[in-house]
Structure formats: structure tokens, C-alpha cells
Amino acid sequence: MKALTLPSAIQTGSEPASSLSFREAVGADGLPRGHWRSLWQEMEALGPQERLRRFETAGRIIHEQGVTYNVYGDAQGMERPWELDPLPMLVSAPEWKQIERGLIQRATLINTLMGDCYGAQRFIRSGDLPPALLFAQSDFLRASHGIKPGGGVFLNFYAADIARAPDGQWWVLSDRTQIPTGAGYALANRLVTARVLPEAFRENQVHRLAGFFRTLQSSLAGSAPQPLGEPRVVVLTPGPYNETYFEQAYLARYLGYSLVEGQDLTVQNRRVYLKTLSGLEQVDVILRRVDDAFCDPLELRNDSILGVSGLTEAIRAGHVAVSNALGSGILQSSAFRPFLPGLCRAILGESLLMPSVATWWCGQQDAREAVLLNVENLDVRPAFGGNSPLPKTFDDLRRAIQFAPHKWSAQERMQFSLTPCWERDAIVERPVELRVFLLGTPDGYIVMPGGLARTGVSSSSFGISMQNGGASKDTWVLSEHPVEEVSLLAAADTPVEIRRVGNNLPSRLADNFFWMGRYTERLDASARALRAALLRFSPETGGSELDLLQPLLRILAVQEQLPAESVREDRSVEALEGDFLDAIYNETRPGSLRNIASRVCRLAMLVRDRTSNDLWRALSQLEDSVAVEMSSWSAGEAIGLLNRVLMLSSSFKGIVRENMTRAQGWRFLDMGQRIERALSLCNLLQESLSASHPRSQGLLESILEIADSTITYRSRYNLVPNLMAVYDLVLLDDTNPRSMLFQLLQLEKHLDRLPRKGAQGPASPEKRLLLRMLNALKLLDPSELGVPGAVLERSETAGVLALVYDSMPRLSELLAVTYFEHSHISRTSA
Amino acid sequence: MEYELIHRTEYRYSEPVTVSQHAARLEPLFEGRQELSGFSLGIYPKPDSISSRQDYFGNKVTVFGIRELHRKLVVEARSRVVVKPLTPPVPALSPLWTQLAARLRDPVSPQDAGIYEFCMDSPMVQISPEFAQWAGPCFGASTPLLTGIGMLMERLYTEFEFDPVATEVATPLEQVWKKRRGVCQDFAHVAIACLRSLGLPARYVSGYLRTIPPEGQPRMQGADASHAWFSAYCPVNGWVDFDPTNNLMPSDGHIVVAVGRDYSDVSPLCGILTGGGEHSLSVAVDVLPVEGKGR
């Protein structure tokens, strides 16, 4: 790599590159190329300090927005933060025009080819395309043969990876036709880069991306088979373990579509429906992120658990449109490349504008011989994809090629161009490739004016991959004219139908919201109980304080934060410190604070497309604050951490309360919180009632503290905590949002507003269960606790607590059965 | 020979099925030596949607969905078929196998696309040098194609054991290969793998077999099951069928229902259900020769 230290690189240019590579930013004369000058000036104007600050800001934004990329087969791989270099890749206007023309032609060609492969197959019969290209591909979906999408667009989305050779010419490295990923990351990169370098972004007249996505929306809507009313479009995801799940959720939210998994959809009467809380809703368009063969277990791969059974039949019946059409994956085989120039002449009557990187398909005799002679120097790969490992030695590889030549192809190793990369305080040049995205409309293809640039770690790497730890960049396509601002929201003068309810919530998401509510509340309750215990746990005191600590330890043990042994009176101080350390920081310990926090974040990821960025930010900070490695105990640090967790948790609740629409998602989140709060309150009170000194001031104070009711208590009673008054406040006071009665009343309101079948009939089982708890609670007279010598453990209050404690988990189950029922799918074959 | 065919499939589920979709390939082909004079498909419970079409390989497939809550599914296919006897080809007169293999080695001529498709890997059959090696002794440098295939069938018949409990419909080929035992489906898959590994086209055939009753006894109802064998392409005779489970070339005792690359293309009845729990399956096939109409 070549260090381009600012500002000398800008002023005088650095020395000519030693390699043959084309340099994106520096001309043959060693001076910055024209279209880069303005960016250099802006960068220089910032000065080293400000540059460093901005670089760090970029990292922070990525982190806060939770931009991630999942890497398979890597223990730490899940949710790896997205690597973004905030220095954009620049492409000048005339150059972009060429790229655009070349790729539009290519997309048009490939779309026609796909139509032919799944239709008349005349290019096979004419000899322009070898039969192997179709028939040797396991992903040539016979079940899709003969299906023609409306408008003749098979390939709604197409992307090409392109790179520049030493002579300055752009070459196509690979075609992405199955499910072209990356447009969402490109969008995320744009938002970060434009925020980090706002001055340069303004100065440079950069083409905006929003227009592309707006056309995408209208073109998807237009592909709906029944153009009546507003079509329902969904994004079909393989789920959160997919490598680009972030992007799927991000795009779904940006475009305003529901993100659904296969199990959220069902086919009935050859139509596709979304299962929602209030019944089935027909789906008109599916933007799929599930691979071809996995989309329909009935007619395609029957071991797929990601697809929708009967989807192919629904497409065939013309009741749903799927983008890209099923079976598009075969077109990305490298074996097509050698035939594209000929096919381009045959189909379009033109010569191919942008060449592919030199590729040999071993099904052709000359190519096979050339590859066999050169296996060491070429990049040999399975021609039709697949994950089977390459043979270990060159001899084995030669034998494999000879046994089934059609399965192999080879391509030239290309020297990529170099582009400046910003790495903290240095600018270095690294090889770059560009992914460009195209959208097929009935009127032809359009190109997203930008792209996903990816840079390699070494300056001569071949085949850059995010899986192998490269970085990505925004791509600025420069305009010769001022650019117009486009927003994704409909223009102000478009007539709008007023709506008070959003799209119906898929039942799977309701489930996730519910558990997110339960776990956020559990986090809160655990942090409060831990803090109360730690404040009373000090190695020096002991004696009287230890009496107070015991009930708190028992509460924590019941909640599974502490091991059962920690309650024993002979537990040493050191052992207890270890217990606390585990209870807070040990991620693998179920019930530890850190463990709960990561569950919360995982659930939040599942509902990302339905929640705001602020909510996400609050939760990811929460997870970060607990995710610290702590080997030795410090009570002070632990309490500080608990305070921070409680503060972030209330900011999360504030966002939920103030910013979340009172729709179904919110309702399930809130129900989860109420149930969990009622449960932890039960636990707290039950343990205190059975403590050795249930009326002690210290214990009552810790109840008020954990139930967050200290201030309320003081404002009502100007006296030391009294058992009866404390219980009245935390159990029966319906103005106290922390009281048991308050939780039950809220739950009652929610249950009354949930959609349900037979709303006129008798009360639902969950409602009946709740009413039983509510009645028992309302009939409770706290004065029984005031009677001197009363056996508190056998009081009516204890009975009601036991009732609630037993009924809440049952209520949670009933809700699950009624609303979240996840259908179990099985398959038969005879 | 004229037949009346009844193929009855019954599923019982331990828990109710709320929604199910099925694809049935139960209607016999109308082609070659075979004529179909009647077909009906009875389904219980009544489907809420049903549609039939010809699939990619020319088989008739019926896709249906049931929305009614059910614990039992019955699908009964009844067909009437006339099969003419085979005029057996003379294997020694067939072209050399090496000629066909060379013709189908890439690059192939567009005219051969249709048969080339059956030389390729398919979902349940992947070619490998191992199969080619095992089949090698049957295919000498100057062996005629059908002679070689006949020897391969014989070798399979002798070295593999018919064992109805060794495998299931989804057992991968490797396991069958290792165990050297299986049912008709497995015998057919092994033969197909061997032929394709030599570069020869082969396809999978599903259908029925008439069991000839012992003399003087009435034929047993329901004793028959669905059967499978393979078909190999010969430049002179077209697709020629071989039944490796019985070591013979099918004539008018075999009725063809569907052809494909392997079992996954022709599965008689596959379904995806919501709910259902455990299921039990019973299949009964009756192949009744129609009296007095034998040709």
C-alpha cells in the first residue's frame, strides 16, 4: 500500500505508483484527478484534529444505528459491526454515463436470457448457449418453467460487481441475479458519509439515492397482479441469522414494507396471505431475500424451512408477484460470461459495452485445455456455485475438471485500481471494487446513481469480500449540474387517505414485542434488586446490616441472579462478591444482568423494522454498558453500572411511552412489561413477608426502593415506613404506576382492546383469569397486616400474592396460545 | 394388456391439520406403448383449491390445498390403462456406449439438449468417479450400449439386496451405496448414478408392476405397491426401460405413471402441513387386469 499523507498528496501529488494499478484519485502526472480536487480541499481544510474527530463520529454513528453484517462460521461473527470508511469513492459524470450504459445493456440482456431459459429456450436450440448452462445447474427450477411475470420483467433487481483494470477500463467481475444484496448498505453508508462530510457532500453535487428507491417503490407496486387499491408489499427474509439481515430490516423500514419470515405467510386458495393478529391479509408483492430453491417447500426444495408452501402455485395462478422471479439464480453463473458477447449481438444486435473479466468455462474444449495448462495461475471455481470445497492439490483439481469439465470455470486474476482510504489519521491507497445496482421496470432498467464500494486489505487482493474483513465506502456519482432533492415520502400534493391504524402486526412480531417488554422489565427489576442489595452489602459493616441483606439475597436467588448457596448465612464475603460479579457481568449465566441485556437486544433486532432508531440506540447503549469485562470486584463500580443501566432503561421506557404509537406492537410490549412487573413485585413482597423481621424499617425501606416508590411514600406519610402503609402503596394504590393494582388494571385495558374472534361471546379465558386476580386484589384489606402478632405468611395478602404469582405465567401462556401460535410445519411424502 | 388401477393413500395425523398443500403425480402417462382411457382423483376432505397441469417432464401433476381442519387425508387415484407389449431391442445391435458418451460430452450439440439434461446431477443423484469405477467392468471399450446396461442391471440385482426396511424415501444415495441394500427406488437411483457418472443419460420412472398370481389362485388385492425403475437413452431405440429390482426389461406388466431425473421429480404424493403432529401412512395399490381384453 502507498501512504498518501495529507496534505502533501494534495499539494504536490505523491510519487508515481510503483505497481501497474490504475489510481482512482491520482493522475499519471502524480497530481490529483480533477473530480477529486474539491474533496481533497475539504479534507485538508478540516485539519488533522477535526479529521480524527469526524472519523470517530462515523464509527459511532454506525454503532448507534446498529449497522451489522453477520459472518457465518465465526463465533464472534454474529452482528459484526459494518466496516465503513467515510471517505467516499468518486466517479465523474462522464465516466458514470459509460458505466450506466454498459450495465443497462447487460441487465437487459440477462433479463431476456432468463425469460428464454424459463420459456422457449431458443438460444439453446440455436446453439448460442450450451445446454449445460441450464441443465447442469441444480438451481434451474423446473417448477418455474413456463411462468411469465407481468411486464416481462424477470429480473427486477440486478447488481454487477465491477472493477477497473490498469488501462482504466471498467470490467464486470460478477453478476448478481439471485438476490442482489448491498443496496441497503449503500444507503446506510450514504447517510453516515453525508453526515461526516457535509461540506464536501454539498460542494460536490452528488447524485441523491432517494429517487432510485422511490422508483423501486412504484415499480414494485406496479408489479402487483391486481392493481386495485394500494397493494401490500412484503420483504421475505430468511431471518435474523442471515448475513444481511440488517439490510433487509433497514430496507423494509425505509421503504415502508413489512419484514416477514416464511412462517408469517400462508397460501390458501392459491393466494398468499400474511398471518396477522386480526386475521389473514392478502399479499400482492413479495420482495424476496430467500434463495430460489428455498422459497417453496412444496414444489422446490422440500427440506426448506424458510419458504412458503404453495408459493409457486400462487405465482402460477397470477395472484402474487415475486421479485426477482423464482429461478433467477442460474444467471449469475460465471459460465455465462464467455457467451455474453455473442448473445448480445444475437439478442440486442449490439456489441457488449462493458466486458467481463476474462473467464473460461471448461465445458468448451479450448477453454478446458487452456485451464488445465494454467490451473496454478487462474482463479478456478465451481461454475455453478455450490459450497463444496476446492480439491486440495492442483493435480486433484485437474482430475476433477477432467471428470466433469462442465462444472468448472476459471477467471483471470485482475489487478484492481487503487482508491484512497481513510484509516484514522492516514490516507492510504487500496484496491477497490464497486457494486452497482439496477432496477428493472416495464420501461427498462434504471441504475442507482451510487453504489457500494468495497476495498481490500492488501493492495493486490483479488476478489474483495466483506466476509473476509474488507471495508466499504459510499460512492459519490458527481453531477455536472446541481442535483434535485428527492424525498422518499410522497410529494406533498399527492392526495392522501387519512389512516389511524397502521398495517396489521404479524403475530410473530407481536410475540417478539411481548418478550421484549418482559425482558426490559426483568432487566429493570434485577438492576433495582441488585442495587438495593449492594448498597447494604459492605464487608465492614455486617451484623445488623446482614439481617437486611438476607431477604434481598433471597429475592435475587429466586429471580435466579444469585446461586442458591449465596443465601446461606455462612457464605463468606469473598464468595458473595464472586456471586455478585457473576450476577452482573457473566454473560453465560442465565438471569445475569448482561445475559438479560443481550436477550433484550436480540429481540429488539427482530422488531427493528417496527421501532424507531432512538429506541434501538437506547437499547444498544444499554447492552454496551453491561458488556464490560470485569475480573475483580469493585462495589463502587458495580453500583455505578447499575445506576447507568437503570437510567438507560428509563430512557427506553420514556421513548416507548412518549414516542410509540398505541398500536398492537406497543400493546404487546406493554403487556409484557406489566406481567413481568407484577411478577417481580410478587416475588419481592412474598420474600419480605416471610423474612425474620418483616416489619423492620430497613426492610420496608428496601421494598420502597426496589418498587421505586420511596418518594411517593414520603409525600404521603411523613413518617418512617409502616408495614400497612407500604403494602397499601405498592399493592392497592391505583395512582401509583408501580403498584400491583395499576399493573392489573392496565392489563385489563389491553385485553379489552385486543382483536379477538367472537367478541360478543363470553369473556376470553385470559380475561377471566385476570378478573380473578383483580377481584381478589380489590377485596384485600391491608389493615389485617396492622394487627399486632398477625402471622403475615398466612395472611390474606400472602394468599393474593400467591394467586398472582401463579396466575401471571398462565396468563402469558394463554396470550401465546391465542395470539402467537406458531404453526408447526411438517412434510409428508409417499 | 388392459388394467384397472386403484392407488389409495391414507394419512392419519395424531393432531389436527389446519392447512395443507399437496402435489400429486398419480395420473399415468399417455405415451409410447401406453394408452390412458380413464382417470379420476378422489380426495377427502374436499380441497378448497385444486389445479392440474403438465409439469416440466410431461407428467400430470395436481396441486391441491385443504383448509378444513382434518385428522385424516385420503387420496384415491383410479385409472384405466392399456399397455402394449415391448418388442425387445437386440442389445448387441445397439451402438457402442463410448459413442454416446462422447457425443454427450461438452460441448454438446443443441439437438441433444433434451437427453443431455439426464446426464447431469439431480437433487438426489450426484455423479462421482466412484460410481463410474464400479460400473466400469460392465462397459468395455467395445461394449454395445444396451449390453452394458443389461450387465449393470444384473450386477446391481446380484450385489444389492432388496430390503424394505433398510431405507426410507429420503435416505441419501451414499447410504444406500454403503449398505448395498434398499428398495426399488434405491436400485433405480444407483443405476442412474452409475450411468450418469459414465456420461450416459438415464432417468427415473415411477409406476406400477403387475404381480402375476400363482396358477389357480386369485390375485391378491392390495398386495401390490408403487414401483420404480430406470430408463436409459439409446440413439437407436429411444428411451429403454430397465427394472433392476427384478432384473428384467419391462414389457406390458409395467405401467408408467411419471418420469423425471430422480424420485424428487416424481414423488406420487408430497405434502406440507400445518399442525398434524405424528403421522401414519398406509398405501394400497391394486393393479387389476381387465378380463378378456388382453392384447
Image (cartoon, coloured by chain):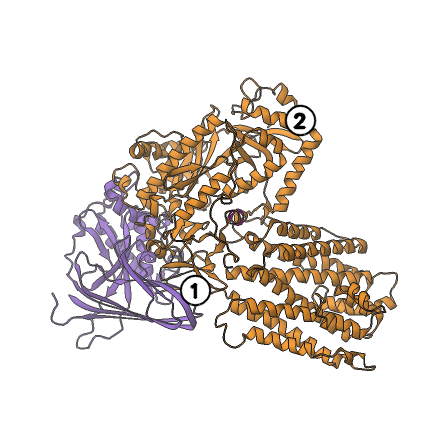
Residue lying at 40% horizontally and 33% vertically, measured from the top left: A359
Q: Which residue bears the numbered disc 2?
A: A45
Q: Position of residue A664 (x, y in %)?
A: 55, 61
Residue B88 picture location, percent across and down: 16, 56
Q: Residues within 10 Å of mark 1 (few under 14, many from 20)?
A: some
Q: For the residue labelled by badge 2, is the local secondary structure a helix, a strand or a loop? A: helix
Left or right of B288? Residue A185 is right
Q: Point out residue A436 in the picture as x, y percentages from the top left corner.
A: 47, 36
Indicate the chain on which mark 1 is placed: A
Secondary structure state at the residue bearing disc 1: strand
Q: Earlier in the sequence, mark 1 or mark 2?
A: 2
Q: Where does label 1 land, which residue?
A: A826
Q: Does the magenta portion include B227?
A: no
Q: Quadrant of residue A721?
A: bottom right
Residue depicted at x 67% and y 62%: A522
Q: Residue type at mark 1?
A: Ser
Question: Which amino acid type is marked by label 2?
Answer: Ala
- Residue A725 seen in the current view: yes
Q: Is A159 placed left or right of A723 in the picture?
A: left
Q: Considering the image in quadrants, where does the C terminus of chain A appear?
A: bottom left
Identify the main secondary structure in magenta: helix
